Amino acid sequence: MPGGAVLTATSDVNRVEAPVTLKAYIMCAFAAFGGIFFGYDSGYISGVMGMNYFITLLTGLDPKTTPSSRFVLPTWKKSAITSILSAGTFFGALMAGDFADYIGRRITIILGCIVFIVGVILQTASTSFGLLVAGRLVAGFGVGFVSAIIILYMSEIAPRKVRGALVSGYQFCITIGLLLASCVDYGTQNRTDSGSYRIPIALQMAWALILGTGLLFLPESPRYYVKKDRLDKAAEVLCRLRGQPRDSDYIQQELAEIVANNEYELQLVPQGNYFDSWFNCFKGGLRNRSSNLRRTILGTSMQMMQQWTGINFIFYFGTTFFQELGTISNPFLMSLVTTLVNVCSTPISFWAIEKVGRRPLMVWGAFAMLVCEFIVAIIGVTDGKNPSAVKAMISFICIYIFFFASTWGPGAWVVIGEIFPLPIRSRGVALSTASNWMWNCIIAVITPYMVGTDKGNLGPKVFFIWGALCTCCFVYAYFLIPETKGLTLEQVDRMLEECTPRASSKWVPHSTFAADMGLTDEKSAEQTMEHKV
């Protein structure tokens, strides 16, 4: 397309995207690999903080002369080590939105991998509390880059019919990372040298190297090129993604729809300087159901609610929590079991999120989780020292993990990648991801004080708190989460304008943006448009 892009638009809502190809599956599946080092980095620290060598290194305590109840990391150190990663990811996610718009989605993820590796090197070299915390902070910036933009990237390149399933693959890779971390922790827990904690930490570099290297061979998002008004490159990328020739009607019509939607949104909220681009995320009133403000609140609050389910209490502090119960002989093995449940349950969402839908999955998932959490709390406060009762508690914790892994775990990530219009999508997803990490950090800071034996010592009673918060998630999901199943990102944009979340499952596409913008002709059903390249 030298000098310009000639696009054929369509008014047929069924021809705004090419058929699904195996190549699209493979590309998205590889991009989802980013979840492995996110999950691994979140999971390894729980086991490391319970290792004898690590506790002695940071406290000077001798396991042979110190009572087991006192041979633990101080609450403030556990809180700082765990939460500092989330603090880094919060700021990394916010910064990632800018980088994704300026240098591209793919390069931003690769940059995140490089930053993450630097953080891992610092952690591996650490023999003191200070350097370990500094390394986790740096690694957090890298995780923030990747966790924010990988969702954006996958949502923009995945075909609509399987977008939910493919983005759910990201959550599945998170669970794989958690499982690998538990396995490595279990294998090194009894080492009496620095390898006990350095091996779990150093292995993280492998995941970042694989993702960063692989992304060098994947295409950029076509929607990024549309945003940059480089339609020749956008068409080239769509050819690779959809397996169609450059002059295919499918390629021309999908690109025309993306361009028309972008121009429509720019008419509603014109772009200005750098600060305006951020303020645009908060424009529009709360009463306007499709305003950018409402979408930003929806995305950020949804990620907050995901953290309110309490799932990271299990994966961050599960090992030390099981140790403090005093009735479990091998807390490391129990953490491995809960992580395995998480891994085995997540693939169910691949099918359910496209067949059942996002909205019902998250409504009933929240209800099931709150029931399990209240049961665990009630058993714990009534007969928590009885080994049989503890087994029942563990069973319901596993059932709770099952429902999280198959509903809210992937569901929240899928929806935030779909609800933002192209002009603010990178920043909207970045703000939503930053919200996840902010609440992740808050929970990581306060939880040790709630359950630590030297502080709040709530024990199983903490599940009353998680159960109450999950009740909030249930109400939230019923009133605020829309159904986006089977729609292109541009059709999701239109659906949010025209109906409420509770009516969204009945909404059916009735026109294209290309037709509404006057880019089609009723007689020929097509028209060309020119853009500078």
Image: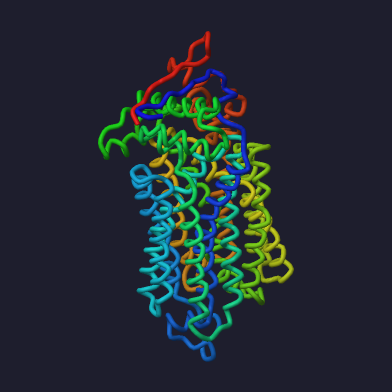
Instruction: Looking at this view, name the residue that lies furthest to the right.
Output: 388
State which quarter of the image contains the C terminus.
Answer: top left
The answer to whether one can see residue 296 in this image is no
Q: How is the image coloured?
A: rainbow
Measured from the top left, where is residue 437 in percent x and y? Answer: 44, 54
Which is more toward the observer, 263 or 21? 21
Measured from the top left, where is residue 58 in percent x and y? Answer: 42, 80
Which is more toward the observer, 231 or 379? 231
Say which quarter of the image contains residue 363: top right
State which quarter of the image contains the N terminus.
Answer: top left
The answer to whether one can see residue 31 in this image is yes
Q: Is residue 168 above or below residue 202?
A: above
Report the number of numbered marks: 0
Q: Which residue is located at x 47 percent, y 62 percent?
A: 209
313 vs 531, left or right, is: right
277 vs 329, left or right, is: left
Say which quarter of the image contains residue 465: bottom right
Q: Which residue is located at x 61 percent, y 73 percent?
A: 332
136 vs 317, left or right, is: left
Measured from the top left, where is residue 524 in percent x and y? Answer: 52, 11
Q: Which residue is located at x 37 percent, y 63 percent?
A: 138
Say which quarter of the image contains residue 344: bottom right
Instruction: Looking at this view, name the residue that lies furthest to the front.
Output: 2
Q: Is residue 230 above or below residue 322?
A: above
2 vs 158, left or right, is: left
